[in-house]
Image (spheres, rainbow, N blue to C red):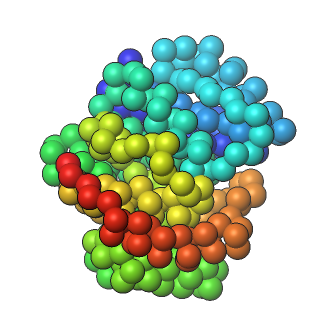
Amino acid sequence: MSNSVVIIPTYNEKENIENIIEAVFALEHSFDVLIVDDGSPDGTAFIVKNLQIKYPEHLFLTERAGKLGLGTAYIAGFKWSLERNYQYIFEMDADFSHPPKDLLNLYEACSSGRADVAVGSRYVNNLVSVVNWPVGRIMMSYFASIYVRIITGLKVKDTTAGFVCYNRKVLEKFNLDKIRFKGYAFQIEMKFTAYKYGFKIEEVPIIFVNRQLGVSKMSGGIFSEALFGVIRLKINSLFRQMKS
């Protein structure tokens, strides 16, 4: 058993799932992998079960009935991980938009003690490190992060990033049942909560590559949740005192 687990939520990722699992296991640091599958009708979970024969002590699967949302998938994964002896708990997409090799940089940031939360960031050093996204989507994401920083005061440039490493003490401090958002806003809420508790957050530069296989799960409703959700986050934080 590793001290690190990578949580990968899936819904219809049969084209990517085997390759992403193999890529994580090929890294020089030992990572365990937890797949949280939302009842994928394309057989994603079946592929994972076959791979569990090859990696019985390092590959795990949680199956959920139906498409319940990204945020709830991660919450389920966090709870599963905290019940076990993992010190470092990662979020990662299945579609290779998050380069597996950069798990090592996120791990180093947290394991060295520099960070309690390490964020794989597309927008550090005044650069936009995104490949194969339409210009409109890049601009929407970039300016959404600026908007979030203005409203919340959060000192993170890539506020919607979904490539993250948490030291377990961060997640132990959260009341995970009170994390309310599911899409983009989920990622913002997690970072904002860590920030309000006073945990150290470090952004690690990555090159984000748009998926080549499978279908994106992004929708306008998810973006709208983020747009209005940050205002609620800020207002609610004014009435709550958080201490690390």
Q: At which x and y percent is residue 201? A: 26, 58
Residue beneath the point at 67% across and 36% down:
37
Residue 93 sits above or below residue 143 on the image: above
Q: At which x and y percent is residue 234? A: 39, 72
Q: Is residue 177 visible?
A: yes
Residue beneath the point at 53% across and 64% down:
185
Residue beneath the point at 40% across and 43% down:
175
Q: At which x and y percent is residue 160? A: 47, 66
**In the picture, which quadrant includes the N terminus?**
top left
Judging depth in this view, the residue of 189 and 48 nearest the camera is 189
Q: Quadrant of residue 233?
A: bottom left
Disc count in the image? Answer: 0
Q: Is residue 44 visible?
A: no
Residue 146 sits above or below residue 63 on the image: below
Q: Quadrant of residue 22?
A: top right
Which residue is most to the front?
A: 239
Residue beneath the point at 59% across and 33% down:
35
Judging depth in this view, the residue of 215 and 75 nearest the camera is 75
Residue 59 sits above or below residue 44 on the image: above
Q: Quadrant of residue 110?
A: top left
Judging depth in this view, the residue of 137 and 77 nearest the camera is 77
